[in-house]
Amino acid sequence: MSGFPAFRHAVQQALFAGLPGHIERRSWSADRIATHQEERLRSLLAHAQARSPFHARRLGDVDASSFRLDDLRELPVMTKADLMDAFDDVVADPRVTFARAEAALAATEHVPEPIDGALVCLVTGGSTGRRGVFVSDVAALAEFVSGILRGAMARRPARPADAPPPRPIAFVGAASAIHATGCASPVMAGSPAPFAPVPVTRPVAEMVALLNELDPPALFGYPSVLARLARERLAGRLRIAPAGVTCTSETLLPEYRAAIAAGFGVPIVDTYATTEGIVGSSDPDDPVITLASDGCIAELVDQDDRPVPPGTPSAAVLVTNLFNHVQPLIRYRLGDVFVRQPDASGHGHLRCRIEGRSDDVLRYGPVEVHPFVLRTVLLREPAITDYVVVQTPRGVRATVQADGFVDLPALTTALRTALAGAGLADPSATVEAVPQLERHPATGKLRRFVAA
């Protein structure tokens, strides 16, 4: 084997050989996690200083061998702009350059095109801001996938040795393998945990037909689309009966959770996974995400990168990826809103509620309008299945996707009332209904709130 088949084989070997250890890590105490983090952090810092000119400059004379976890907050914060502006200096593998990464991405369609058969590139943020390019080797990708799958694999009953190959789980995600959700199916093909791709960029009727043909044992995918498919099942057009549903890649809003539960009537697991490396998952029907703290350090911070106390929404999360040495990310800022929850009694991993992105807030001078103010109005309409809200100088312009009648004048009035209630004087609002919103062609995502 060569090329991607050889890369996939190596990833699967590492993944399934390491899964028992990953499952055991789920019960690690806070002290054991801290010890592991500190050991991995020292290794990461030493590697970054030696191999990455960008980090060598920023880390200066830091002594990696004696570095402590508490010292991390003294290091500078890294942004996506830092990463992309100095890409070739950030990466710590001489085989990787921005030009080679872009060439690999351009050659990627339904399966990744590895650099030198050894390094896979993914993108993020193309639908929500500046595009980011991220590179993983076999070891890093196996660790990343292990962090996502280990909860499900721990709950999965043992399969007899003579059992037939498992039916693929349907993955309702990106159409292209340049996005993590589109990369999952080709990476896991032929493994004990296979996925079948169901691109969210297809019309709903085509997704329904494909799912009916697949008859998957479980569903994995974007919650906004799974909620739409749940409606199709209630209407009798979608005839599958999955044993479980797992959401990923978007915030699982209460409205989506309720729609999925009503349509499928099975346990719902929520996962959080970023291409930057931080991952976590919930227990079935639990809104709290448990992060894989053994793989990444997550610092919940305010707008000035100062720690926020438990129970306080963060303005961002600073991620230090402990397993990817190809492209070291050290205190990398993600604009996600996390709220730390009480610690669990059975393990020491960080537990959070995830409330979306801080850059979804619409700001009109001193007035801030949070997404839930408008989302509550839009999702109160039973026919609305998705939406995009664009900020205007005095209000918003909303485009809604609906599968039935929507009283647009009444909805417009309700949006104005909500904006006024949030403190915006004399607000304006317009609403347009369309048969289908255009999703990003590669990621299948929507930017639902677009600030001016």
Image: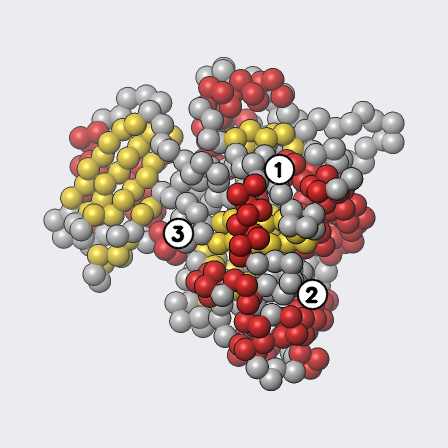
For marks 2 and 1, the one nearer the N-term is: 2
| Residue 16 placement, left or right of 64 | right
Front-lying residue, 83 or 271: 83
Badge 3 marks a residue whose secondary structure is loop
- Determine which of the numbered discs, if any, sits on residue 129 in the image: 3
Residue at image coords 40%, 40% = 446
- Farthest-out residue, left: 426
Q: Which mark is residue 111?
A: 1
Nearest to the eye among marks 3 and 2: give it.
3
Among all residues in the image, which is located at the extreme bottom? Answer: 61
Residue 99 percent coordinates (x, y)? 53, 54
Evaluate if marks 3 and 2 touch, with contact meaning CB atoms under 8 Å apart.
no
Q: Nearer the viewer, residue 405 or 180?
A: 180
Q: Quadrant of the N terminus?
A: top right
State the CA–CA distance, disc 3 to disc 1: 25 Å
* Residue 357 circle label: none
Q: Quadrant of residue 51?
A: bottom right
- Cα gap from disc 3 to disc 2, whole angstroms: 33 Å
Q: Residue at 64%, 54% (x, y): give it.
A: 136
Residue 417, position in %: x, y? Answer: 19, 43
Q: Which mark is residue 33?
A: 2
**Lateral position of residue 70 relative to residue 24, left or right:** left
- Residue 433 visible to the viewer: yes
Task: Please tell me which residue is depicted at 56% across the width and 36% down the height of the picture.
Answer: 109
Q: Is residue 14 above or below residue 240?
A: below
Q: Is residue 26 left or right of residue 403?
A: right
Residue 21 position, x and y percent, is 78, 53
Question: Alpha carbon of mark 2 to alpha carbon of mark 1: how far?
Answer: 35 Å
Pointer 3 or 1: first along the chain: 1
Name the spot of residue 439 as percent of width and height, x first. Answer: 41, 35
- In the structure shown, which secondary structural element does the residue marked by tag 1 occupy? loop
